[in-house]
Image: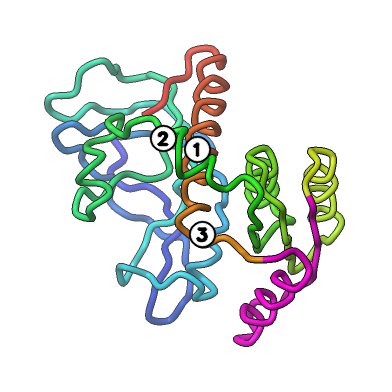
Amino acid sequence: MVDTMRAERFYAESKTIAVEDVPIPEPGPGEVLVKVAFCGICHSDLSLINGTFPSQRPVVTQGHEASGTIAKLGPDVTGWAEGDRVIVAAGRPCMTCPRHREAGPPGGQPDPDPGQAVTALAGRVAMLTGASGGIGKAVARALADEGVDLFLTYGRHGDDAEEAATYARGEGRRAVVAPADLADPTAPARLVEQANGELGGVVGGEGIRGVATKLAHHLAQVACAAFDRLDGVKRV
């Protein structure tokens, strides 16, 4: 049996990557070993390489958006079998920060409260950076649905940010689109000033977090439903 696998490795000190042969890990208690069939490239993989995200380890095996088959079961694993086709969850709770301790193990996070944190945003103004990307546009739509006026910024692809603004206007919301170079340290203050001047007071981060939690819950439900429609594919 082959005891090594090919892996793309990121070295934090030199900020370089290399494809190497590394030992195949043994699944521990409650774990499974997945033989990867396909793997996507996440923007966070790129952000490690370019230094946007500081690495938490000296060497990182990248590629967390993967699918494949279970090759081996660790001790105490139930409900899974070797050969099961699976899609791997992109992250897992650290169980050390207050939020994860409160939520508990995976699956223990309660549904977001549909009350004060979200409904209090109606009639307010939110500034959203990165509004031309897929996640940014989804957040913009969710905010518009909650009655929020939008100040949308983008680095590239202004037409995509304008698409999000058009949706918001169709919902009866005000929406302004502005280019932004967030590598410029003076940009955030200037953008807030512009947003306040054109639309009024910008809502703080706590309110946005309420909508983000609601949106994440909705997207997770959609994704899970899509995965469940795939013949013979489970979620790890």
Q: Considering depth in this image, is 218 or 8 the residue closer to the camera?
A: 218
For label 1, the SS is helix
Mark 2 neighbour class, 10 Å CA radius: few under 14, some 14 to 19, many 20 or more: some
* Among numbered discs 2 and 3, the one appearing first in the sequence: 3
For label 2, the SS is loop
The N terminus - image quarter: top left
Mark 1 neighbour class, 10 Å CA radius: few under 14, some 14 to 19, many 20 or more: many
Residue hosting label 2: 112
* Amino acid type, residue under disc 2 in the picture: Pro
Say left or right for 188 vs 214: right
* Amino acid type, residue under disc 3 in the picture: Ser
For label 3, the SS is helix
Of badges 1 and 3, nearer the viewer stands 1
CA gap, disc 2 to disc 3?
25 Å
CA gap, disc 2 to disc 1?
6 Å
Find residue 214 and name its label. 1
Q: Which residues are magenta?
A: 174-200
